[in-house]
Image (cartoon, rainbow, N blue to C red):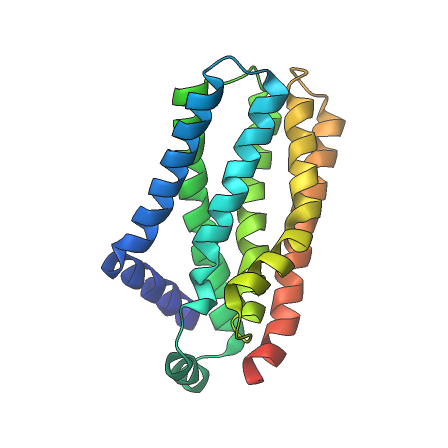
């Protein structure tokens, strides 16, 4: 745990020193939402609001998480290989990227609400789905970034592998958001949605923990 905590601290220090990365992502989110507002105004139906929001968040996740392993030089990866265990490396990356996505997701939701309004979504379903969705997107794309970093064409492989991996989670998040339009959701249905999203998140984490050590030694 101490090793993982130090690696997470290292990720935050690198982000503070390279503020252009997070600033670039925030600029992307702001400019995208602003262009959407110019095209549609505030007069859009609720299902269009949901579709646009998750599309923006999906591409923000790709931009934020893709640099996770791709930006690491081979010499730095060798250094980490010598001083840290693969489990500590992958867990620290997933925790940091999840925290980053929660911040970016919250900012995106706030900006999107300011520019496009907020439909009558049932917060008891939408908010937990949104939080678990951010964590799931970050965790899945972290593992995809690790695989893509072993390829010469990192950006293309990240896009090719990333979308099929996050598609089941994305479909479930959209379905949960649309269900939240109906107003208050029954407890059994709410638990079913939360259990399904949580299960996908756990499967991603377990697969990363099992497979990453083999990828790390390659």
Instruction: Place residue 114 in its image quadrant.
Output: top left
Q: Answer left or right for 65 relative to 196.
A: left
Q: What residue sits 63% from the left and 28% below the top? A: 177
Residue 48: x and y, percent? 60, 23
Instruction: Place residue 32 in its image quadrant.
Output: top left
Q: Going by the picture, which residue comes out furthest to the front?
A: 39
Residue 192: x and y, percent? 74, 35
| Residue 68 sits above or below residue 115 on the image | below
Residue 132: x and y, percent? 57, 42
Q: Nearer the viewer, residue 73 or 31?
A: 31
Q: Quadrant of the C terminus?
A: bottom right
Q: Quadrant of the N terminus?
A: bottom left
Q: What residue sits 56% from the left and 84% below the top? A: 217
Q: Going by the picture, which residue comes out furthest to the left?
A: 17
Residue 60: x and y, percent? 47, 45
Q: Nearer the viewer, residue 123 or 175?
A: 175
Q: Going by the picture, which residue comes out furthest to the top?
A: 43
Q: Nearer the viewer, residue 188 or 38?
A: 38
Q: Answer left or right for 158 relative to 105.
A: right
- The tally of labels here is 0
Q: What residue sits 40% from the left and 42% below the top? A: 103
Instruction: Place residue 215 in its image quadrant.
Output: bottom right
Q: What residue sits 50% from the left and 37% below the top? A: 56
């Amino acid at each position: 745990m101490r090793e993982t905590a130090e690696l997470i601290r290292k990720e935050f220090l690198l982000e503070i020193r390279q503020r252009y990365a997070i600033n670039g992502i925030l600029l992307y989110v702001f400019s995208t939402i602003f262009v959407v507002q110019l095209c549609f105004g505030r007069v859009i139906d609720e299902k269009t609001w949901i579709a646009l929001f998750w599309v923006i968040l999906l591409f923000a996740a790709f931009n934020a998480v893709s640099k996770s392993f791709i930006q690491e030089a081979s010499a730095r990866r060798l250094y980490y290989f010598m001083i840290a265990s693969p489990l500590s490396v992958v867990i620290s990356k997933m925790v940091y990227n999840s925290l980053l996505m929660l911040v970016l997701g919250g900012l995106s939701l706030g900006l999107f609400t300011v520019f496009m309004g907020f439909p009558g979504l049932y917060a008891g379903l939408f908010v937990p789905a949104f939080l678990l969705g951010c964590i799931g997107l970050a965790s899945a794309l972290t593992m995809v970034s690790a695989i893509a970093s072993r390829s010469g064409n990192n950006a293309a492989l990240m896009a090719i592998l990333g979308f099929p991996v996050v598609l089941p989670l994305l479909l479930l998040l959209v379905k949960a958001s649309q269900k939240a339009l109906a107003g208050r959701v029954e407890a059994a249905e709410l638990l079913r949605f939360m259990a399904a999203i949580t299960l996908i998140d756990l499967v991603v984490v377990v697969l990363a923990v099992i497979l990453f050590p083999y990828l790390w030694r390659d």
